[in-house]
Image (tube, rainbow, N blue to C red):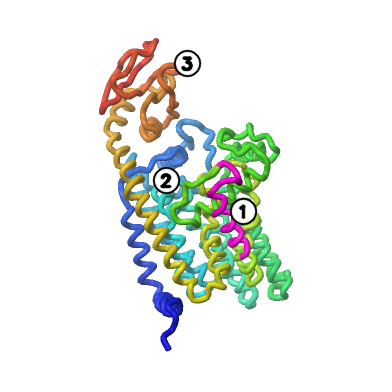
Amino acid sequence: MTAPLSARLDRSLARAEARPWPWLALSALVLAMQISPLWYATPDGTAYLSIARQVAAGGPLSRLGSAELSFPLGYPLLISPAFLLGERPFLALSIMHWLLAVVFMLGVYAWARRLIGPPALWVTGVVMASVVVWALYRRTLSEAAFLSVMIWAVVAWNALVGALAARRPRAALLAAAGALLAALTMIREAGALFGAGVALALLAGLLRGEVSRRAAALPLAVVAIAALVGVAAIRPERIAAASGVFAGRVAAYADAGAAVTGPFSARLHLRVTEIGQLLMPGMFSAYGPGWVDINTLVYVPLAVIVAVGWWMLVRGTADVLVLTAPFYVALYLAWPYFGGTRYLLPLLPLLVACLWRAYRPLRHWRRPAFALALVAHLGVAAGYWLIDDAPRARACDRQWPAVQQLAARIELDSGAVVAADVSTCVTLMLMLALDRPVQAADGRHVDQSIGWIVTAEPAGDVPGFRAHASAGGYALLRRPD
């Protein structure tokens, strides 16, 4: 008797799990296709590059000319050697990010293989096909480093807890796990929360009688030290700003304009939305203003399925990432800022694994469903890159000669610079070229602190300014001395 279609599909897809490495290599090759000398400009990316350039130059440390860095040092330290190659080492940075993506991919597979076995291939594939993963790895943002270090820190701590349970303490593994946790916290403050996940995993081992108190004491001490070392790299103003948020004084934080200032339900809606945006192909930017919205009809049931899958996982294993998730989600429920899925992205491997476990009742349809999701995610990610993201980056890249010419004519000690009626990427390129803030304005209402205006040609009359130079369709106006 012929087996049902679902069973035949399931067996066919299961055969791929027996030889995962060609598929992982293919994924790495697809990611390598995105290596390029283009800069996908963002405000945070500009700041990171400014700090990294100062690190490469030997200091003093600054961010766009300011001693207040406002960003942790981990990522700028990591990418700073690229600036030894030149002022705009975007190709070298793209190669570095590709290497980090491959490291992340291998880490996701290693982590998921321990958690769910050979189907880890499908969890890894869905994660690496995410449009959000692709988009953020193309940008000079800390996600590339954070994701890679995070997943291997989880793998290392899981291995250490397992070694303690088997009565095989390993000093080298403990040192590596501690170093990864410290590095993770240096890249982003939220990395310290993974120490809580480690503590819970050790506590679970203690309660089951697998780990003795004496064996758990040293790893817990290493966790505390690693977190302190990482926090030491966080600038004081970051801590001061965060304290304003958690004290309920949202206005104390520099990004107050991007805050969700409503009730707790508004922040919960935001995070539920971000879970859906990460998991649903094609919905990475679909957002409704409240709970009564067509998108919510998709996101809420999906979040419930994820929660069910997480509960199934937590009952079956003391995994560090699984146990860290409640602390991580709680942080970003308290942290009332939009992140465009950046904040919850580190949980993506877990979110996908939760779906795998929750979809167990699908039986033979589970692998086909994940294969279909992988193809859908891949199509969305490739389409966004080829049709939208890359063309915009190429258009911006063509502005570099004009930006460099204008930047060379600006005297930084003669007033602030305003970019009026130009694209955001040109404004960010000017900031990077000048290593100074550049204000965005309409060019008609400028105060006395403004000494320079960069605007599109033809430049209209701006009282108190005269034409100084032009390049590539842009005019540089200067306030006379």
Image quarter hosting the C terminus: top left
Give the residue type at disc 2: Thr
Q: Which residues are magenta?
A: 289-308
Q: Looking at the rendered structure, which numbered label has been put on residue 447?
A: 3
Label 1, residues with CA under 10 Å away: few <14, some 14-19, many ≥20: many
Q: Secondary structure at mark 1?
A: helix
Q: Residue 178 at x, y = what percent?
A: 58, 60
Q: Can see residue 96?
A: yes
* C-alpha separation, residue under disc 2 versus residue under disc 1: 23 Å
Residue picked out by circle 2? 140
Q: How many marks?
A: 3
Residue picked out by circle 1? 328
Give the residue type at disc 1: Tyr
Residue located farthest toward the bottom when viewing the structure as drawn: 1
Label 2, residues with CA under 10 Å away: few <14, some 14-19, many ≥20: many
Residue at the spot x=30%, y=35% of the render?
A: 400
